[in-house]
Amino acid sequence: MTIPRPLLIALFSLAASLLVGQRGTVPTTKPQSVYNRPGAPLLLTAKGTHDYSIDNVSKDRIVSYRLGCVRVPNGSVIIVKSTDAEKVDWPPGSGVLVLRTGQSGRRLTCEHMDSLFSIIEVQFADGRVWKATNSK
């Protein structure tokens, strides 16, 4: 028995659309892999398995920031690993910087330490410093 060509095309199209639909709904990162402290001047967002964006959501110029791995028991932030400060010159409300961490990147290191990828420190142009551990 042969399947009529129009029916075969319709079945193939349906199968392809179902596969594309499923692929579109499968998350590429775990939602819990990033932690943004409420009130933080920078917003870190997972954009894919190894891609992140950082947005300056403050009203001040930022001259450096540090990333780290944190645990957040009962709302307090405990830093388990930190990176060196990255020098930047981001005006208030500036655009997005995309980070690509790669297979041995910071996020994977954080997950292996049962912790979350986070902004842990921000320095403003006027000398003020925001820290995840002492900010509420």
Image (tube, helix red, strand yellow):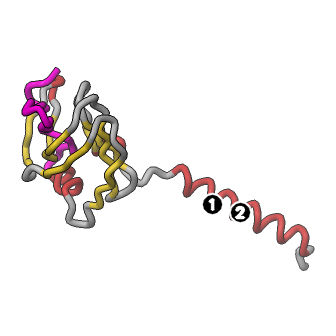
State the residue position of label 1.
Answer: 19
Comparing 48 with 5, the one in front is: 48
Q: Is residue 68 visible?
A: no
Asked whether 123 or 25 is in front, the reply is 123
Look at label 1 and name its amino acid. Leu
Residue 37 sits in which quadrant?
top left
Residue under numbered circle 2: 15
Relative horizontal placement of residue 130, taking residue 16 as reference (left or right) = left
Question: Disc 2 to disc 1, how far (Cα)?
Answer: 6 Å
Extreme top residue here? 136
| Quarter of the picture holding the C terminus | top left
Q: How crowded is the residue under tag 1: few (<14 C-alpha within 10 Å), some, or many (20+)?
A: few
Which residue is painted at 14% across and 35% down in the image?
A: 124
Q: Would you say 6 lies left or right of 48 here?
A: right
The boundaries of the magenta stretch are 113-136
Please tell me which residue is depicted at 7% across the width and 52% down the height of the picture. 84
**Is residue 124 on the magenta stretch?**
yes
Could you say where residue 6 lies in the image, as x and y percent from the top left? 90, 70
